[in-house]
Amino acid sequence: MRPFTSLESHAVLLPADNVDTDQIIPARFLKITDRNGLAEHAFADWRYDASGRPHADFPLNAPGARDAEILVTGRNFGCGSSREHAAWALDALGMRAIISTSFADIFRANALSNGMLPVALSEADHGSIVQELSRHATVTLRIDLASQTVTLPHDTSRRYAFSIDAFAKRCLLQGVDHLGYLLDAAAEIAAYEATHPASLCTTC
Amino acid sequence: MNVTQTASPNAPRTLFDKIWRQHMVRPQSADAPAVLFVDLHLVHEVTSPQAFAELRARGLALRRPDLTIATMDHSTPTTPRASNGRVPLNDVLAAAQLTQLEANCREHGVPLFPLGDERQGIVHVIGPELGLTQPGMTVVCGDSHTSTHGAFGALAFGIGTTEVAHVLATQCLLQTRPSTMQIQVEGRLRDGVSPKDLILGIIARIGIAGGAGHVIEYTGPAIRALDMEARMTVCNMSIEAGARAGCIAPDDVTFEYLAGRPFAPRAMEWDAAVARWRELPSDAESRYDRSVTIDATDLAPMISYGTNPGMAIPVDGHVPDPHVSADAQQRAALERALRYMALEPGQRLLGMPVDVVFLGSCTNARLSDLRAAAAVLRGRRLAPNVRMLVVPGSQRVKREAEAEGLHSVFLSAGAEWRESGCSMCIAMNGDQLAPGQYAVSTSNRNFEGRQGKGGRTFLASPLTAAATAVRGAIADARTLS
């Protein structure tokens, strides 16, 4: 997994609450056995018209959005389906951090699994960044994971703190995934299994 | 979050606390989440291929095939079988997923109930009906509606594909202890008011993020009075309130349902299991991080009008006016939803024509759901403007329904009687709405495009769905003459 330490990028604003994973990647694009091809289908029903042409007014179609690595969006981002394809699709679009006030639980875990940082700000701080993005065509944000802050490089007086649990932070900073940690617990898992006989056997 | 609240060994514990502690391989610390053991891992074709690929890439074995089971449900067609018994599969992408699942299960020794198997069905329908889901278990699946299994007093939740790989490789998950939320449901559902109406009412009340970070336990007399299929409907939609999981303490209703099921414990093991399960309900005086009380007696049949499951009103109610919301973002969301649904503020939904009625999904495709709808449809015909799909949740549900003659009721009414699968709930298998079409659907999500690009979904109970099919327009089953 690619480490996440700090990131300076311009941001795209998707001003909607409760963006569900069916919007991020509609189910008809889940018929894959790998992770390929998701970028072009991300937000497909919001991004393209019936004939497949990009909607000019959809934020991710704006010329400046192409190399943005930060998505700023509304409350409860990623609600609904557990499909990790949503995190993969955002990753394929080049997004490395999502800024909101809250995330759906499963989406948050999926983002972290892919080295993508979910930044939950207070309503006031989030509102301030949204206002900045609404006023200017391009806004650059800097996210520093070690100090857990979002800053505006052109205005150092503005500094927004976010919280993240210590484990997720360490994994992101070091670029290590969680599977290695679980595999290291093999002896404890075996000890648990030895003392907790299963009440089920699907193969018997 | 309060991690220390259960520190005292004699402190009263909730159902969740008990299951959580019993599955602790390594406790949570300041540095890391808990390592939680998984008793049952359900696998399907859409969210597992990349997880198996991860095992292969790392050279890892599947740790516990004996606690794993797979079926095919999401991308599978539900169209009637050919005369030779074969399932028509015209979608090459879906076919590749099914072939991959077969190969993965064969390679790792995972039992698979494939398309055409008599045990095949929606993963959240077959787990319970086969007796795989049992009280006190931890159950996971790469599907958010895994919350369904909480109806048995299990801790059951959806996970992403990376976590599917974690469970395949280690039978464990890293989990931060969620908070607990009690939803106490007083009174009793009135006649004509369904478990689906109860959960839609709960979500409308607490909101689609109202349960975020929490495991909900549904308690109270109205919950105790529900049978297992009703409890599954309620727990199923816990995720639509944003909850990590939803659960209901096991009782005699639970044990009676499980007794004799293929994977349920037998003979002396059964007695020992029941004795263990009787210890699971929350202790008196146990504390929850949050509590909400709802009176079931106040509830009417519910229907969604918007583009998330929290946007729901009584079926005879009026679409809300976005302008009454003080919150600018909520107002914007409501306006957007009404635009998508092409509805006017203040409009009544009763009498509004619909194109499709969908009776199916892991929420409402069990035998009791089919019986409820059939009771409305018996001796009646669908309105000519309506297409109705009846999609049993599993092959077993299909057989049981046919043994009672329910399929004849649906077919005589003019509805389609399908093979089991997720069908139009997820619209990635050929069953879908056309752009602009309206559907009354017994499924769980009314997100934009969920049932097909541009399709418009009203979520409701099987009773409301059946009454709507007869009228050709949104109807209240209580007043269908």
Image (tube, grey):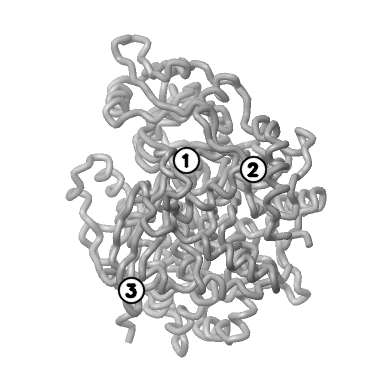
Amino acid at circle 1: Tyr
User: Which residue is drawn at the image coordinates 76% and 34% (left, top)?
Assistant: B57
Badge 2: residue crowd in 10 Å (few <14, some 14–19, many ≥20): many
**In this picture, is A21 found above or below B298?**
above
Residue B300 position within the rendered picture, expressed as x and y whole percent measured from the top left: 29, 71
- Front-lying residue, A13 or B109: B109
Quarter of the image with the N terminus of chain B in it: top left
Q: How far apart are marks 1 and 2 (CA)?
A: 41 Å
Badge 3: residue crowd in 10 Å (few <14, some 14–19, many ≥20): some
Q: For mark 3, what is the residue?
A: B188
Between disc 3 and disc 2, whose residue precedes?
2
- Numbered disc 1: what chain? A
Amino acid at circle 3: Arg
In the drawing, does residue B25 fall left or right of residue B469? right
**In this picture, is B27 found above or below A194?**
above
| Residues at marks 1 and 3 on the same chain | no
Quarter of the image with the C terminus of chain B in it: bottom left
Locate residue B347: give its quadrant.
bottom left
Q: Mark 2: which secondary structure?
A: strand
- Numbered disc 2: what chain? B
Q: For mark 1, what is the residue?
A: A48
